[in-house]
Amino acid sequence: MRFVIVTGMSGAGKTTALKMLEDMGYFCVDNLPISLIEKFAELTFTSGGEVNKVALGIDIRSGQALGEIEQVLERLTMDGRQYEILFLDAADDVLVKRYKETRRVHPLAKDGRVDKGIALERERLVYLKQHAEYIIDTSRLLTRELKSELEKIFVRNQEFKNLVITVLSFGFKYGIPADSDLVFDVRFLPNPYYIDELKAKSGNDKEVQDYVMGFSVATKFLDKLEDMLAFLIPNYIQEGKNQLIISIGCTGGKHRSVTLANRLYERLAAQDAYGVKIEHRDIEKDAVRKAL
């Protein structure tokens, strides 16, 4: 029997996650009153195998009754009913943007200020987040990427270390990504932009990759970066970090940074120890500017 409590910040993707879990064969119930959780757990755990995978949605809509969740979960543990908590989170600015785009009203934003509602919600959900086995930050996740992470945990039963890494290429002339955790400058490498046959291509093309990686210093840089990340990542996880954005920049964000970001992504993804995704923020911007 697998009993999963799905919770998290409003706007972080809890409803989407429940729908995905339902597609994965879980019996899903959303917004069940806190007072009924123990009875619901009793019914599912004693169903004789008729129901063996359950996902229960709990969030701030439970109101003041949410304050009773700690006692309810403690009693479930005492009764021998094992459960797991999945907490969906996102950065405050991302949550505000999502609310603005959908024109939804935050359940705790009585005065209309979404940011205040989010702050209050974080306070009320602190117990659930602290006791969550799985925390997924959806700030930069696409829907298909969230599905992939859920499948790892709840279908393939892979180990999940509560960290999603984004490898992000960018161009310094367009500005350093504001949400970067680590920034690396690869402008020390020769620039393919000045090679006529490579100028119009990008770091996603083999010709550019072969040119950039043809310099031994590029591989040496990757080796040293990978070694440093092997030290940093476990410590970030230990400190409770859920999202790590590694930004790699060159002048325009089209050739060198894209090549190195792709290679770093391949190395990290091969370890299969945490979620890894890649983004090329500025790869098309030169073409757009020229068109204008």
Image (cartoon, grey):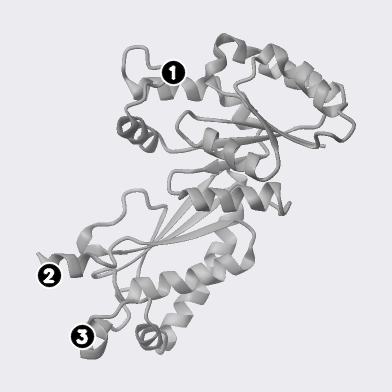
Task: Kindly indicate the quadrant of the structure image that contains residue 97.
Answer: top left
Q: Earlier in the sequence, mark 3 or mark 1?
A: 1
Q: Which residue is mark 2?
A: 290
Q: Position of residue 202 (x, y in %)?
A: 31, 77
> In front here: 203 or 127?
203
Q: Position of residue 134 (x, y in %)?
A: 64, 41
> In front here: 17 or 160?
17
In the picture, measured across the screen, residue 270 lies left or right of residue 109, that is: right
Q: Position of residue 195 (x, y in %)?
A: 23, 89
Q: Which residue is mark 1?
A: 107
In the picture, measured across the screen, residue 36 lies left or right of residue 235, that is: right
Which amino acid does the dot numbered 1 rest on?
Pro
Residue shown at 20% from the left, 89% from the top:
196
Q: Position of residue 96 (x, y in %)?
A: 35, 31
Q: Earlier in the sequence, mark 2 or mark 1?
A: 1
Which amino acid does the dot numbered 2 rest on?
Lys
**Of tags 3 and 2, which is closer to the observer?**
2
Q: CA distance from mark 3 to mark 1?
A: 55 Å
From this view, report whether residue 98 is shown above or below residue 178: above
| SS for dot 2 | helix
Task: Kindly indicate the quadrant of the structure image that contains residue 49.
Answer: top right
- Of all residues, the one furthest to the top in this rendering is 64
Residue shown at 60% from the left, 46% from the top:
162
| SS for dot 3 | helix
Marks 3 and 1 close (CB-CB < 8 Å): no
Image quadrant occupied by the C terminus? bottom left
Q: Which residue is mark 3?
A: 194
Q: Earlier in the sequence, mark 3 or mark 2?
A: 3
